[in-house]
Amino acid sequence: MERITIFGRPGCGFCVRAKQLCETQNLDHRYIDIHAEGITKADLEKTVGKSVETVPQIFCGQKHIGGYTEFAAFISEAQS
């Protein structure tokens, strides 16, 4: 599986859960704190290619997966 990239923010429970899922599954991942990096919602929308309302926004390689719920389903499907 390609590297997982999680765009999140401090204090976001779903961002924490996405990171924990990567860690428990031993997935190559990186977490990007959008506040610390100065990434705006508009920047994320350009990266994702559509309107973004929530974080985390998660990618597998260059492919946009979605938020935590979509990511959990993606991981579950990849393992079956």
Image: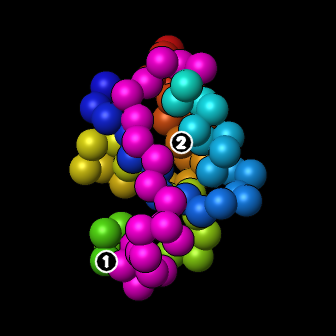
Query: Mark 1 and mark 2 in contact (Cβ < 8 Å)?
Result: no
Q: Mark 1 belongs to which amino acid?
A: Lys
Seen at 65% across and 60% down, the residue is 10
Q: Position of residue 14 (x, y in %)?
A: 69, 50
As measured in the structure, the alpha-carbon distance from the residue carrying label 2 to the one carrying label 1 is 20 Å
Q: Quadrant of residue 48?
A: bottom left
Provide the residue span drawn in magenta. Answer: 24-45
Q: Nearer the viewer, residue 78 or 3?
A: 3
Q: Please say if 6 is above or below 51.
A: above
Q: Is 41 a magenta residue?
A: yes
How is the structure coloured here? rainbow
Q: Please say if 36 is above or below 74.
A: below
Q: Nearer the viewer, residue 12 or 67?
A: 12
Q: Secondary structure at mark 2?
A: helix
Identify the residue position indicated by label 1 in the image: 46
Q: Is residue 73 left or right of residue 47?
A: right
Q: Secondary structure at mark 1?
A: helix
Identify the residue position indicated by label 2 in the image: 71
Q: Mark 2 belongs to which amino acid?
A: Phe
Seen at 53% across and 19% down, the residue is 25
Q: Position of residue 9 (x, y in %)?
A: 60, 62
Q: Is residue 59 left or right of residue 76?
A: left
